């Protein structure tokens, strides 16, 4: 009886393989155009990102912004540039609004600008009240209808020559309607396409890390999103950069890396979705779908069991990989703890860091290898809990080389300080025994020591 069952299952498996072979021979159906945009493939994702873009009025300042939160859902959290809301914040004003449509801000016959608050939502300024890096987080008084959160993606993923799209409401576009009103509809969002030149620190902007690109932006675009062709936000449109050399002038556009915003949202305890690249799949069109249905009907429960079993195996493999990564992080931290708490004389003399206060206050860790501090366990081996005030995903790096200790800030949002001096991002400094350093502020500080 057992032999008969196995033969029966083998026949079903053979039939399964034959039908799968037929599926592979069916040509892929052409990608259908996006109904709303009329574009195809990934370009429609960038087009759909317009649904997260807003125009912002702050006192006499006007700029763009975009929604963050659960991707595709309406939200009350928005991002813009600091310089858009700077005057209101510094003066203590309370006149910051998200404009909902083209009727919100109009110009009368006398040239006077008039705000219709029934077409706008009032906001308060939540995060990053500093000039650099140039961004600010706003919270609307209510969830803004018809504007949805966009996915965020670390600028570490930005590669030279890749296409990007700048979205926003450039002031020059308002001339198209004779300056009778200010564009603010979703359908009025302006898009310009370009390519990434580089990701670098810009000295004139207090070494803010920016994406330099050639997607055109101008006054009014400030605060709008720079997105990939998949619609993921990697930067905040901010500055135009003009360089002159021997009479020749070059113009670049730059967008502040979105990582600063991601760190600030973590600090504020505000949830936001990040972009998750999807694996490319071969499309077999409608014909393949029909054959799959026939396949399942033909092979019955045996084939269904086959698919369920394969899916379960993949899920178990994924869970095992996640568990392995967590175990590696925990093991790395245990090794640091063991060496820090080892009895005197049980290890060779060397450098170590002593926690002065904060989460690691009173604990000691040996510096016998590279140490990267931050909140991202996939990038750091000295981990702070997610949401620790001021701590970036990758904040700072320590190494021991030629019997000396060196440290650099890794472009963190709130900086790294040593002996009350703020470090220049991505520049190494040498540390000495007795030097005190901290991440963001003195609440998370350490001192360089040596084991005896």
Image (spheres, helix red, strand yellow):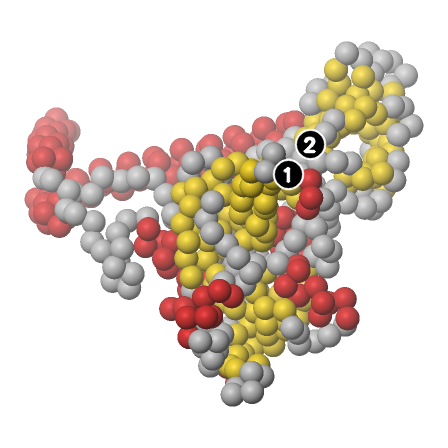
Q: Determine whether, in the image, residue 148 is placed left or right of residue 412.
A: left
Quarter location, residue 331: top right
Q: Determine whether, in the image, residue 355 is placed left or right of residue 307.
A: right
Q: Residues within 10 Å of mark 1 (few under 14, many from 20)?
A: some
For marks 2 and 1, the one nearer the N-term is 1
Closer to us: mark 2 or mark 1? 1
Tell me residue 259's x, y (percent): 59, 46
Residue for point 28% across, 36% down: 310
Q: Determine whether, in the image, residue 320 is placed left or right of residue 271.
A: left
Residue for point 28% across, 64% down: 36
Tell me residue 84's x, y (percent): 63, 63
Q: Secondary structure at mark 1?
A: strand
Q: Determine whether, in the image, residue 61 is placed left or right of residue 320.
A: right
Q: Quadrant of the N terminus?
A: top left
Closer to us: 309 or 318: 318
Q: Is residue 144 visible?
A: yes
Tell me residue 284's x, y (percent): 16, 43
Q: Secondary structure at mark 2?
A: loop
Q: Is residue 65 visible?
A: no
Q: Which residue is mark 1?
A: 201
Q: Which mark is residue 145?
A: none
Closer to us: 13 or 23: 23
Tell me residue 117's x, y (percent): 56, 84
Q: Are marks 2 and 1 in contact (CB under 8 Å)?
A: yes
Q: Which residue is mark 2?
A: 426
Looking at this view, name the residue that lies furthest to the bottom. 109
Q: Residues within 10 Å of mark 2 (few under 14, many from 20)?
A: some
Closer to us: 123 or 310: 123
């Amino acid at each position: 009886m057992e032999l008969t069952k196995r033969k029966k299952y083998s026949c079903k498996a053979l039939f399964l393989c034959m039908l799968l072979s037929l599926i592979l021979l069916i040509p892929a159906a052409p990608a259908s155009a996006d109904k709303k945009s009329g574009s195809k493939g990934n370009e429609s994702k960038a087009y759909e990102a317009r649904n997260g873009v807003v125009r912002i009025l702050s006192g006499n300042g006007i700029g763009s912004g975009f929604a963050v939160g659960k991707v595709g859902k309406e939200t009350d959290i928005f991002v813009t540039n600091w310089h858009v809301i700077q005057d209101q914040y510094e003066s203590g004003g309370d006149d910051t609004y998200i404009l909902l449509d083209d009727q919100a801000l109009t110009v009368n016959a006398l040239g006077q600008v008039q705000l219709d608050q029934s077409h706008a939502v009032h906001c308060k300024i939540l995060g990053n009240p500093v000039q650099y890096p140039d961004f600010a987080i706003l919270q609307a008084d209510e969830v803004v209808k018809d504007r949805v959160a966009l996915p965020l993606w670390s600028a570490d993923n930005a590669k030279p020559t890749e296409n990007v799209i700048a979205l926003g409401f450039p002031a020059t576009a308002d001339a198209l309607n004779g300056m009778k009103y200010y564009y603010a509809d979703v359908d009025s969002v302006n898009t310009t396409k370009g390519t990434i030149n580089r990701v670098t620190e810009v000295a004139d902007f207090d070494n803010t890390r920016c994406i330099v690109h050639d997607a055109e932006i101008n006054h009014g675009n400030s605060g709008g999103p720079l997105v990939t062709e998949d619609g993921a936000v990697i930067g905040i449109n901010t500055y135009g950069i003009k360089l002159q050399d021997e009479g020749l002038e070059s113009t670049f556009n730059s967008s502040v890396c979105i990582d600063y915003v991601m760190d600030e949202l973590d600090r504020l305890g505000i949830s936001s979705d990040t972009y998750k690249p999807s694996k490319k799949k071969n499309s077999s069109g409608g014909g393949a779908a029909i054959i799959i249905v026939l396949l399942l009907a033909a092979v019955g429960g045996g084939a269904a069991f086959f698919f369920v079993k394969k899916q379960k195996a993949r899920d178990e493999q994924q869970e095992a990989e996640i568990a392995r990564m967590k175990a590696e992080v925990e093991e790395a931290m245990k090794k640091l703890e063991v060496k820090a708490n080892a009895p005197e004389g049980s290890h060779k003399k060397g450098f170590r860091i002593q926690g002065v206060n904060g989460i690691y206050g009173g604990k000691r860790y040996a510096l016998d290898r590279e140490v990267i501090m931050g909140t991202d366990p996939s990038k750091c081996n000295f981990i702070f809990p997610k949401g620790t005030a001021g701590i970036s995903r990758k904040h700072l790096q320590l190494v021991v080389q030629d019997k000396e200790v060196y440290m650099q800030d890794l472009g963190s949002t709130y900086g790294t300080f040593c002996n009350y001096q703020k470090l220049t991002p991505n520049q190494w400094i040498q540390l000495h025994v007795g030097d005190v350093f901290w991440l963001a502020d003195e609440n998370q500080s350490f001192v360089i020591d040596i084991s005896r």
